[in-house]
Amino acid sequence: MTGKVANGVHTGDLRYFLLSTPADALAIDSPDGELLTKDDVVRMYGASAATAGKRLDALHFQGGATRGYQTADGKYHVLVRLFRFSTAAGAKTWLTSLRPVTGWKAFPVSGYPDFKAYDIPVDPTLAAARLQVVGFRGDVFFEVNVFGQPPVDHNVLIDRLRKQIARLDTGS
């Protein structure tokens, strides 16, 4: 699997740009990550699926990718999603159109004022709390989630965020 980034345009297999699974972590599903279709993304948005599908079409959604892993100590589950659009404006518009769910507590991400980060309370179906940060780099929207027992360490999320940004910015 290969990919390149030049001037914020990502080409090749989108899975190439996913945050790498650490050597000592346990990959969830495929170690290479999974591709996401428009229908896959629409299903993620549940009740607002019809709106999500129309917005993806309007923004010229090109495809998505996801990868998850469990940290070596078993303390955290990390899930990353990437959505590629035809332009950076499409990725930015997708980001700015997202709204937090009631009960999500926003917090700032130092150095990244345009990103949105949330502390999400325990989900009874998952028995875990979650931190999430969303942003975009060039034509790719990204979402980094860290699940764990509350309180989930913000430093774990920020570390994964910085690694994901480096991967999107340089392709390495």
Image (cartoon, rainbow, N blue to C red):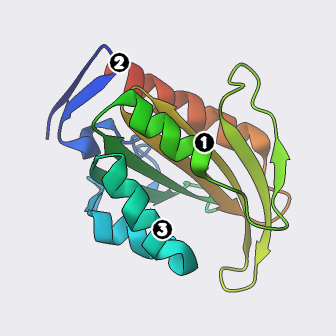
In the image, residue 56 above or below residue 127: above
Q: Secondary structure at mark 1?
A: helix
Q: Residue at x 38, y 63 (%)?
A: 54
Between disc 1 and disc 2, the foreground one is 1
CA distance separating discs 3 and 1: 15 Å
State the image coordinates of residue 33 (x, y, percent, origin top left): 30, 56
State the image coordinates of residue 123 (x, y, percent, origin top left): 73, 77
Q: Is residue 74 visible?
A: yes
Q: Amino acid at mark 1?
A: Thr
Q: Residue 96 got which mark?
A: 1
To which residue does mark 3 refer? 51
Q: Secondary structure at mark 2?
A: helix
Q: Residue 70 got which mark?
A: none
Between disc 2 and disc 3, the foreground one is 3
Q: Residue at x 36, y 46 (%)?
A: 59
State the image coordinates of residue 38 (x, y, percent, origin top left): 30, 63
To which residue does mark 2 refer? 170
Q: Residue at x 31, y 13 (%)?
A: 7
